[in-house]
Amino acid sequence: MTSTTDSMPSRRGFLGGSAKTLSSAGLVAMMGSGAALGFQSSGNPEQDVQLLNAAIALEHEGIAAYTIAAGSGLLAPEVVNIGVIFRGHHREHRDELIRAVETLGGMPVAAESDAHYAEALNAGSLQNQADVLRLAYGLEVGAANAYLGLIPSLSTTEQHQLAARMAGDEAFHAAILGNAIGEAIPTAGLMFG
C-alpha cells in the first residue's frame, strides 16, 4: 500500500485577498511543518484572515469531494450515508471559519464549482468504492495535518481551539476511512502533525 502522502491528490486552496493559488497538498505541507505559509503568530488580523481563508478553501473542497462521491454511483448506500455525515461536519467547519474571518473584518473565500473540484481531484479516474475511500482518506489525513500546522500561526486562543477541534474531527474521519480501506494501525504514536 502506498503511503498517505504518495496517494494524496493534488488539490487547490485559494487564499483570499491576494488571489494566490496553491495546491492544497503544498498548503498542507507548509501548515504541517509548523511554518504555515512562512508566517508566525504575530497578532496580525490580516494574516489570520489569510490563513483562515486557506482553511475555508480546504473545507469547500472537502464538501465538494463528499458531494461528488455521493453522486458518483460508486458507493454502497451505507457508505454514502457516512459521507453525507462527514460532509455535514465539513459544512459546520466552513461556517465556523467564515464566522471567524468575518469577525476579523475579512471577506471569506468563495467556493468554486463542483466541476472545478472534480477536475482538481481527478474524480474521473475513480473506478470503484475503494478508489473513492482512498481519496477521502488522503484528503482527511491532509486536513488533520493542515489544521495542526495552522495552530501555531494563528493569533488567538479561540482560533487555536477552533483549529484543534477541527483537526480532531479530521483525524476521526481519517480513522474511520482508514479502517474501511484496511489501512494498518500505526505502530508509533504522534501520527498526525
Image (tube, helix red, strand yellow):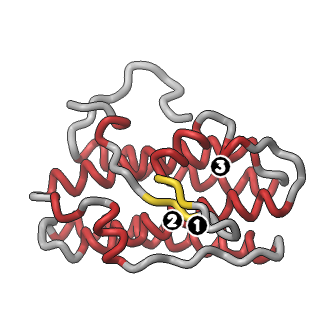
**Residue on which the image places disc 1:** 56
Residue 164: which numbered mark, if any? 3
Residue that mark 2 sits on: 59
**Distance CA(mark 3)–CA(mark 2):** 15 Å
Q: Residue at x 78, y 57 (%)?
A: 47
Q: Is residue 61 left or right of residue 155?
A: left
Residue nearest the observer in this picture, 141 or 30: 30
| CB-based contact (under 8 Å), mark 3 and mark 2 | no
For marks 3 and 2, the one nearer the N-term is 2
Quarter the N terminus occupies: top left
- In this orientation, which residue lies closer to the viewer: 144 or 44? 44
Residue 38's label in the rendered image is none
Q: Residue furthest left?
A: 127
Q: Is residue 172 left or right of residue 17?
A: left
Residue at x 79% of width, y 41% of height: 40
Task: Say above or below: 126 vs 16.
Answer: above
* In this view, 156 is above or below 64: above
Give the amino acid at mark 3: Ala
